Image (cartoon, rainbow, N blue to C red):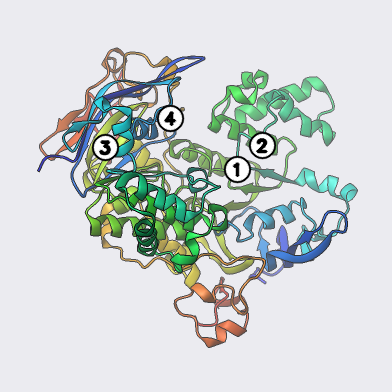
């Protein structure tokens, strides 16, 4: 089966006062139909910009999609006209953002925001759209949908608003949903409700899901495949178990070692990643992780390592010493 | 309330603390129409040198607890004994001495530092206010010392906050708290705004400082993994009440209260193999409003084991195992 979405060598940059920021610097990955893929990384790693670039939602200026192909359902989204692209967004690709308060329109009722989608994309008449909206709110677990339809976003709690966002994303029966930090603003117990809901709905309806998050726990619980991003690039990619149990990029490994875990007793000390993420306006030719890397060698300063397969398990890592990286072994000191 | 060795006086003892915020209507003839019961009868002790974690979801009253202890709020009712002295009713003037002993580290390193002040001046201001190091030269030396204690280059004294990263700013926030040589620090979501890789650095720094300066922390957080790592004891709050209190590992390994159990189950662990074996039922419903909290046990509308009695009677915090307290009538 061909992949549903295939991103090839996508580059997006922003013009800033301090210079050009290569926020997304040549990322490639694919998503199969019905599959859940996670994109994980810290602030500034390019994970959100990467997703917004797929949807062509980069504000320009200052942003610009420099190059790349995004094959979706046999078409290159980068080559579509603005009108066709508008049809794709919300139609074939649904979106769920972090802040349900800012991504819902505060002056339109919940019902209007759902029916608008159906009327725009599906050409439904008002009565049919209304009926479907009730159905959708029921689907996302909102009690008393008839009454809720007449309410405005500020009358709903954060968890409820996110359910409404999911209902809107699902309205036109998309094949893919892109969820950018969908539960970061929510409390743990509500986060669990929303994630379970998204998982059960995407499984049931056969919708593929790209989850963008910084939370390694969420990735472990929900994703089948994982892309780890650092400074605009995918540094490691593979199945969730392979990423967590046999990481082959020093950044992935360091990240896993630096998170405190709920299921482990009090440790004496965490093993943090020293230093800070790089200034994206001043990235040199080499590997962006080099200044913080315990495995760095001279070559890392000269050229950036390409994302290459490790064995034949489908795991990829962008590191010259990827084969030496393992959770058990500490790196040998390099003179 | 908490079991203490004979003769050991806790650094902080909170008794029956209530903080109710009035809701008013009308601008000219303003009158009270209700109240938000942010903290509704909390007993808590903090021993010298320990880190007590205070966890719960938004609106549970954990931040208000911290603000009452800092006396940024005047509690509605109850006593706050700090080193044996009740500070709950003290006036502004009497509080000055206390401020030197109790400090705070805030969540957001962006909004808690004055953008127009250089780091050096941010750090020397508390010393000036409290008359520590009256000599400007010595104050400057102390600023540099504080910066290097917190892992920053002493030259950062000449920088403005916007010239620094989030992690660096949080280190400045920590240095500012240390400037007056406090014995007790309230850390209100002190690492929540930071990226994972930076978070671990700050957690280690807080731990080092506690040992080095013999500090006591009240660590307010919603991230349970961080709390497990950093705290000796943990109190779990829900809707203004402490529902469970015990040694850290005890709370995480053998939770007794149904809310604590649900909270722990909701946190995904960064390990797909562990996650694949876990089954869980997310807690239904949402946290009720503290303006109109449920009668009886505040958790009963969401509780999987609630019985009729729970709708009527407010459960007491009881010591069910040595040192392990829970407020639930249905567990023994």
Give the SS element for disc 3.
loop
In which quadrant is the C terminus of chain A drawn? top left
Of residues B178 and A333, the one nearer the viewer is: B178
Chain under callout 2: B
Per the image, the residue denoted by label 3 is: A329
**Rendered view: B22 above or below A116:** below
**Rendered view: B228 above or below B148:** below
Disc 1, disc 2: CB below 8 Å? yes
Per the image, the residue denoted by label 2 is: B112
Marks 2 and 4: which is nearer the front?
A: 4
Which of pointers 3 and 4 lies earlier in the amino acid sequence? Answer: 4
Q: CA distance from mark 2 to mark 4?
A: 22 Å
Of residues A194 and A288, the one nearer the viewer is: A194
Is B66 left, or right, of A151 in this rendering? right
Going 31% across and 66% down the picture, which residue do you hit?
Answer: B279
Q: CA distance from mark 3 to mark 4?
A: 29 Å
- Can see residue B332? no
Q: CA distance from mark 1 to mark 4?
A: 20 Å
Per the image, the residue denoted by label 1 is: B107
Residue B213: horizontal and vertical position, in percent? 65, 42
Marks 3 and 2: which is nearer the front?
A: 2
Give the SS element for disc 1.
loop
Which of pointers 1 and 2 lies earlier in the amino acid sequence? Answer: 1
Going 41% across and 35% down the picture, which residue do you hit?
Answer: A42
Residue A328 has which mark? none
Residue A171: horizontal and vertical position, in percent? 33, 52
Chain under callout 3: A
Marks 3 and 4: which is nearer the front?
A: 4
Per the image, the residue denoted by label 4 is: A44
């Amino acid at each position: 089966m061909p992949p549903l979405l295939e991103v090839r060598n996508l580059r997006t940059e922003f013009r800033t006062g301090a210079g050009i920021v290569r926020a997304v610097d040549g990322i490639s990955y694919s998503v199969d139909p019905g599959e859940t893929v996670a994109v994980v990384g810290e602030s500034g790693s390019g994970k959100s910009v990467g997703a917004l670039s797929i949807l062509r939602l980069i504000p320009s200026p200052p942003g610009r999609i420099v190059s790349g192909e995004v094959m979706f359902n046999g078409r290159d989204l980068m080559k579509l006209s603005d009108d066709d692209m508008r049809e794709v967004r919300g139609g074939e690709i649904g979106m769920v953002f972090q802040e349900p308060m800012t991504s819902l329109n505060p002056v339109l009722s919940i019902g209007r925001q759902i029916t608008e989608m159906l009327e725009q994309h599906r050409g439904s008449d008002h009565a049919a759209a209304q009926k479907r909206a009730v159905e959708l709110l029921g689907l996302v677990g909102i009690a008393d949908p008839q009454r809720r339809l007449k309410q405005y976003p500020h009358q709903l709690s954060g968890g409820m608003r996110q359910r409404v966002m999911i209902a809107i994303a699902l309205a036109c029966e998309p094949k893919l949903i892109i969820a950018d930090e969908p539960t970061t603003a929510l409390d743990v117990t509500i986060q669990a409700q929303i994630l379970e809901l998204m998982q059960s709905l995407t499984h049931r309806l056969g919708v593929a899901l790209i989850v963008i998050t910084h939370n390694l726990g969420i990735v472990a619980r929900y994703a089948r495949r994982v892309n780890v991003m650092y400074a605009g690039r995918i540094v490691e990619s593979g199945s969730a178990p392979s990423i967590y149990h046999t990481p082959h990029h020093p950044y992935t490994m360091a990240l896993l070692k630096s998170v405190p875990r709920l299921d482990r007793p009090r440790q004496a000390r965490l093993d943090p990643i020293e230093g800070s993420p790089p200034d994206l306006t001043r990235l040199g030719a080499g590997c962006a992780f080099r200044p913080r890397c315990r495995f760095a060698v001279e070559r890392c300063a000269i050229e950036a390592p390409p994302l290459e397969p490790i064995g034949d398990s489908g795991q990829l890592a962008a590191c010259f010493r990827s084969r030496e990286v393992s959770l058990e072994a500490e790196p040998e000191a390099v003179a | 309330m908490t079991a203490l060795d004979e003769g050991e006086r806790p650094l902080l003892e909170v008794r029956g603390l209530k903080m109710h915020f009035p809701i008013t209507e009308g601008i000219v003839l303003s009158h009270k129409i209700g109240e938000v019961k942010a903290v509704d009868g909390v007993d808590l002790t903090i021993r010298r040198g320990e880190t007590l974690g205070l966890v719960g979801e938004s609106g549970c009253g954990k931040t208000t607890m911290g603000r009452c202890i800092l006396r940024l709020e005047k509690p509605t009712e109850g006593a706050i004994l700090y080193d044996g002295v009740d500070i709950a009713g003290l006036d502004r003037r009497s509080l000055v001495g206390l401020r030197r002993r109790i400090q705070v580290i805030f969540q957001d390193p962006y909004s808690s530092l004055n953008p127009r002040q250089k780091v050096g001046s941010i750090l020397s201001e508390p010393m000036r206010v409290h008359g520590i190091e009256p000599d400007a030269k010595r104050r400057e030396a102390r600023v540099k010392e504080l910066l290097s204690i917190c892992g920053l280059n002493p030259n950062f004294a000449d920088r403005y906050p916007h010239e620094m990263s989030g992690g660096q700013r949080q280190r400045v926030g920590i240095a500012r708290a240390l400037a007056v040589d406090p014995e007790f620090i309230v850390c209100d979501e002190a690492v929540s705004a930071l990226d994972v890789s930076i978070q671990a650095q700050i957690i280690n720094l807080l731990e080092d400082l506690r040992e080095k300066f013999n500090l006591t922390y009240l660590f307010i957080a919603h991230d349970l993994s961080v709390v497990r790592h950093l705290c000796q004891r943990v109190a779990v709050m829900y809707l203004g009440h402490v529902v469970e209190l015990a040694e850290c590992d005890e709370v995480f390994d053998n939770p007794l209260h149904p809310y604590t159990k649900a909270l722990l189950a909701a946190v995904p662990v960064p390990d797909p193999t562990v996650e694949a074996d876990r089954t869980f039922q997310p807690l239904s419903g949402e946290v009720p409003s503290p303006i109109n909290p449920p009668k009886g046990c505040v958790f009963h509308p969401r509780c999987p084991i609630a019985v009729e009695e729970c709708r009527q009677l407010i459960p007491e915090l009881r010591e069910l195992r040595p040192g392990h307290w829970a407020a639930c009538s249905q567990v023994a």
